[in-house]
Amino acid sequence: MRPSTLNLAVGYISLGLAALALFATPLWYAWRVTVHEGLGEILQADAQRLSDVFRRDGAPGLTRYIETRISLNIPNERFLLLADSEHRPLAGNLPGWPADLPASAGRYTLDVEARGHRTSADFVSMNLPEGYHLLVGRDLARNVKLEHRFWYALASAVGILSIFGTLGAILIRRALLDRIHGIRQTVSAIIQGDLSRRLTVDRSADELNTLAQTFNGMLEQIEQLIHGVRNVSNAIAHDLRTPLAELRSRLEELTLTRPPVEQTYAELEAAVADVDRVIRLFNALLRLAEIDSGTRRAGFVGLDLAEVAANAVEFYQPAAELKNCSLTMQSNGPAPVRGDPVLLAQALGNLIDNAIKYTPEGGAIHVEVRRGPSHSVSVSVADSGPGIPVSQRAKVVERFYRGDASRGTPGVGLGLSLVDAVARLHGSQLQLEDNRPGLRAVIVLQREAPAPAPLADGTRRSEALLAHSAS
């Protein structure tokens, strides 16, 4: 943790220093250029005025003018010097013509001896008529003081930024350590088996709070999955005990009593039925595990849900007729969706099979596929049976749960669990509603724009058979 907070502090301070440098560099450059150009313009204008005095009054007049200006002792007065053709001083406040000053007129920066000390100054040199020379300069010491103040201010800003950056890093480190300490305590409690522990979430909307909410959601899902595994394990053990006990009892009775051949074959057929029941249980569990893993999404294709539903209704029509129930279907046209045709056939087959089981003789079962708004397709299976109480609707989709109405019917309680898993795999969920009387099960899917090609008859039949085996 320390390297992370240190890196964070260094990063913030470096970013602040970079921003300060980006701000100060153009400001410094603009100031230097402005001062340099402004000083040159002032010196050039002053030299031009002195040149005009020379043309009007001659060398004596310019000499008197320069001496008068020097005698006024104006603060920060410029350097002035009038020299003859041999560069001998005639008037001014410089002891002599600078030896290293070029002979040609122009602007130069030189170190000169003036007022008892050596200083750096900007000069404008001008050649006057009759061989006279004029030199006008300005001491740069004042500008140097301003530069020093600028650098002092910049250094102070760097120091303040570094101090506050370090203090901010310390505060951030403490806040992060407090949050991480809470995460560590929660994770330690979960490792020790307390799955109910959750991270503390406050009202702030910072990144750590968002991460804590996401982590809590993951913990909720993990706790549900673990409880689900426990419940499934208990249910499997309970549901396997009965058929296996019956199978053992039959086989043991056969070995002890050795009945006639016909009775022996009858008992063997019953034993095979018990084994088939166990196999159907494990097949349903494997199918649910495959659906929960999401691997079946790779087999999604375009299909007509109305056609899948029509095939399922056609397959279960004889079973409904045997119970003297009417099984009808209604659709408002093709219903193109994208999904797994086998799993959707299984889900519809389970819903229709359940409806036939619980609908009394002479009842009615109605399957409807309808294209709805917002590019949705709904498929519903409604019956006139006893229905499911509202208090049990959330539980009937749990694996191995069997309500009061299903106690005397065959099955292991995985039919609606498989339907709900298929719906969730397709981005939907199983909705159970009142049909008054009976139950209405609804699945809503997203509609696909292009209509798929009709399924082959062999595919239809295999889907219906698989759907029947899942019930």
Image (cartoon, helix red, strand yellow):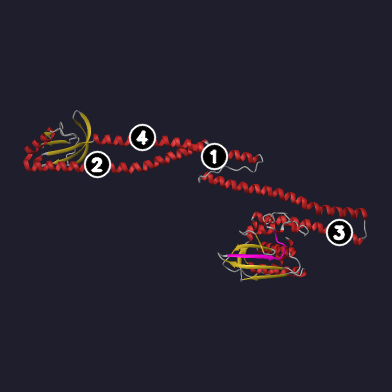
Residue in the picture at 56% in, 45% down: 212
Q: Do the residues labelled 1 and 2 touch (CB within 8 Å)?
A: no
Question: What crowding class fits label 1: few (fewer than 14 Cα within 10 Å), some (14-19), or many (20 or more)?
Answer: some
Image x and y of residue 58, in percent: 6, 40
Q: Give the residue at mark 2.
A: 36
Q: In which quarter of the image is residue 378?
A: bottom right
Residue 316 located left or right of residue 256: left
Frontmost of labels 1 and 2 is 1
**Distance between the alpha carbons at the discs numbered 1 and 2:** 56 Å
Q: Do the residues labelled 2 and 3 touch (CB within 8 Å)?
A: no
Mark 3 burial class by Cα count in 10 Å: few <14, some 14-19, many 20+: some
Residue range highlighted in magenta? 376-388
Residue at mark 1 to residue at mark 3: CA–CA distance: 65 Å
Q: Give above or below for 152 relative to 389.
A: above
In the picture, the disc for residue 179 is: 1
Which residue is rendered at x = 93% and y = 60% of the image? 260
Mark closer to the observer (1, 3): 1
Badge 1 element: helix
Instruction: Determine the CA span between mark 2 and mark 4.
Output: 26 Å
Of circles 2 and 4, which is in front?
Answer: 4
Q: Which residue is drawn at 69% across and 70% down?
A: 328
Pick whichever of labels 3 and 4 is earlier in the sequence.
Answer: 4
Q: Is residue 161 left or right of residue 243?
A: left
Q: Identity of the amino acid at label 1?
A: Arg
> Which mark, by number, is residue 268?
3
- Closer to the chain start, of discs 2 and 4, is 2
